Image (tube, grey):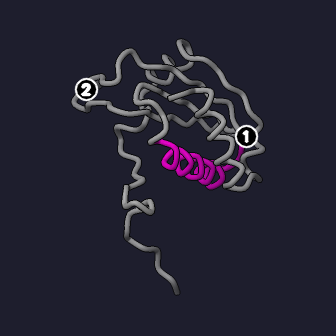
């Protein structure tokens, strides 16, 4: 059987497409701030909330936040844990591909819709590309 590669995902130029903790929105207060102070962009696959942080570098505990951050909220109504985790993996992968094109001050929270279950990865990439154009560099 084929075993999964332990090699990190890299672009053709050799840049890593990682998803470190500094690129994640983890705390309820950060999600709430994005919902309350940001703006909403709706699409067929997900609703997105975008918020420009006040400054491109912030201190959050001991971690310095530099670069765009992504938060995901997938309700149980979408499906079981396996389905919710699959959607989150696909959305994180799209974020990794576009992360270099997003301005460093942006916090983005995605709320996927049921349509994301059956969408191809190419459709998710296109939807994320449209989001980046609106949420901006």
Residue 121 position, x and y percent, is: 67, 55
Check residue 115 for magenta coloring.
no
Query: The magenta stretch spans which residues?
Result: 77-99
> Relative to 17, is 23 above or below?
above
> Relative to 68, is 36 above or below?
above
Any mark on residue 45, and which? 1
Viewer-side residue, 58 vs 25: 58
Instruction: Count residues near mark 1 (Cα–Cα under 10 Å), then give few for <14, some for 14-19, many for 20+.
Output: many
User: Which residue is most to the front?
Assistant: 13
Instruction: Count residues near mark 2 (Cα–Cα under 10 Å), then give few for <14, some for 14-19, many for 20+.
Output: few
Q: Label 1 vs label 2: CA separation?
A: 33 Å
Residue positioned 67% across, 47% down in the render: 124
Residue positioned 69% across, 36% down in the render: 46
Foreground disc of the pair 1, 2:
1
To which residue does mark 2 refer? Answer: 61
Left or right of residue 52, residue 123 in this image: right
Check residue 91 for magenta coloring.
yes
Left or right of residue 77, residue 104 in this image: left
Secondary element under disc 1, as helix, strand or loop, is loop
Residue 13 position, x and y percent, is: 40, 60
Residue positioned 71% across, 47% down in the render: 79
- Prevailing SS of the magenta stretch: helix
Viewer-side residue, 15 vs 42: 15
> Relative to 89, is 75 above or below?
above
Viewer-side residue, 26 vs 8: 8
Secondary element under disc 2, as helix, strand or loop, is loop
Q: Quadrant of residue 38?
A: top right
Residue positioned 47% across, 79% down in the render: 3
């Amino acid at each position: 059987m084929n075993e999964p590669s332990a090699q990190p995902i890299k672009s053709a130029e050799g840049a890593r497409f990682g998803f470190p903790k500094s690129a994640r929105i983890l705390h309820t207060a950060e999600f709430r701030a994005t919902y309350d102070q940001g703006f909403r962009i709706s699409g067929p696959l997900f609703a997105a909330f975008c918020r420009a942080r006040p400054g491109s570098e912030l201190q959050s505990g001991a971690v310095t936040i530099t670069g765009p951050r992504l938060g995901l909220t997938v309700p149980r109504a979408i499906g079981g844990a396996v389905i919710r985790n699959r959607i989150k993996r696909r959305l994180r992968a799209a974020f990794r591909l576009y992360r270099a094109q997003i301005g460093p001050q942006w916090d983005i929270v995605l709320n996927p819709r049921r349509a994301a279950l059956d969408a191809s990865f190419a459709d998710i990439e296109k939807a994320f590309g449209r989001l980046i154009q609106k949420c901006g560099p």
